[in-house]
Amino acid sequence: MSLRRAVAERAHGRCEYCQCPEAFSSTTYCLEHIEPLALGGLTSIENLAFACQGCNGFKGDKTAVWDAVTRRAVRLFHPRRDRWSRHFAWSEQGLEMVPKTLIARATIITLKLNRPALRNLRGVLMQSMIHPPA
């Protein structure tokens, strides 16, 4: 099995950040280095996340960001170490990700996880009973 296929299957075909399925994307998802190569990360299954082009682009080589509220560095969500449900929830309408933790807030802001295109896609997927993911 290819590395891409293994990472995609582990992610159930969804971006591990915004949770949108690749099957409904106009672009192919990529293997994103959670710990960037530039910072010493490896190309290994443990260090790869399945990510849409938007989330991958906004994350870039960031692993932590400055939080203006707490005035300290906050690490971003790590798909291999963190449980999604501990950090995030869905809004009552199901269109937006809601932070439960500082890590989630930093990740939502940095990766723009509630950008208009994602909210629109989530709305369409809700009508087909495909969103929110189980």
Image (cartoon, rainbow, N blue to C red):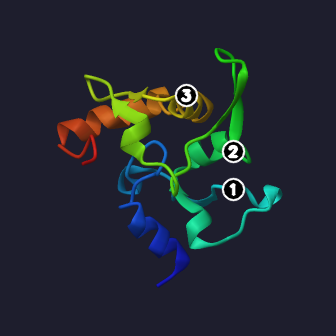
Looking at marks 3 and 2 on the same chain, the residue that comes earlier in the sequence is marked by 2
Q: How many marks?
A: 3
Q: Image quadrant of residue 93?
A: top left
Between disc 3 and disc 1, the foreground one is: 3
Q: Nearer the viewer, residue 93 or 116?
A: 93
Q: Is residue 120 left or right of residue 65?
A: left
Of pointers 3 and 1, the one earlier in the residue sequence: 1
Which residue position holds label 2? 63
Q: Residue furthest top?
A: 69
Give the label, 3 or 2, closer to the camera: 3
Question: 10 Å neighbourhood of mark 3: few (<14), some, or many (≥20)?
Answer: some
* Mark 1 and mark 2 residues within 8 Å of each other at the beta carbon: yes
> Mark 3 highlights which residue?
102
The reply to whether callout 3 and callout 2 are in contact (CB within 8 Å) is no
Crowd band around label 2 with a 10 angstrom C-alpha radius: few (<14), some (14–19), many (20+): some
Secondary structure of the residue carrying numbered label 2: loop
N-terminal of the pair, mark 1 or mark 2, is 1
Report how far apart the C-alphas of labels 1 and 2 lie in the structure: 7 Å
**In terms of depth relative to the viewer, which is nearer, 33 or 26?**
33
Q: CA distance from mark 3 to mark 2?
A: 14 Å
* Residue underneath mark 1: 35
Q: Residue at x 50, y 28 (%)?
A: 115
**Residue at (33, 36) in percent of width and height:** 122
Left/right of residue 25 with respect to residue 49 in the rendered view: left
Look at the numbered disc 3 and give the secondary structure of its residue. Answer: helix
Task: Give coordinates of residue 57: x percent, y percent.
Answer: 65, 44
Seen from the viewer's position, the closer of residues 62 and 72 is: 72
| Tag 2: amino acid | Thr
Looking at the rendered structure, the secondary structure element under dot 1 is loop
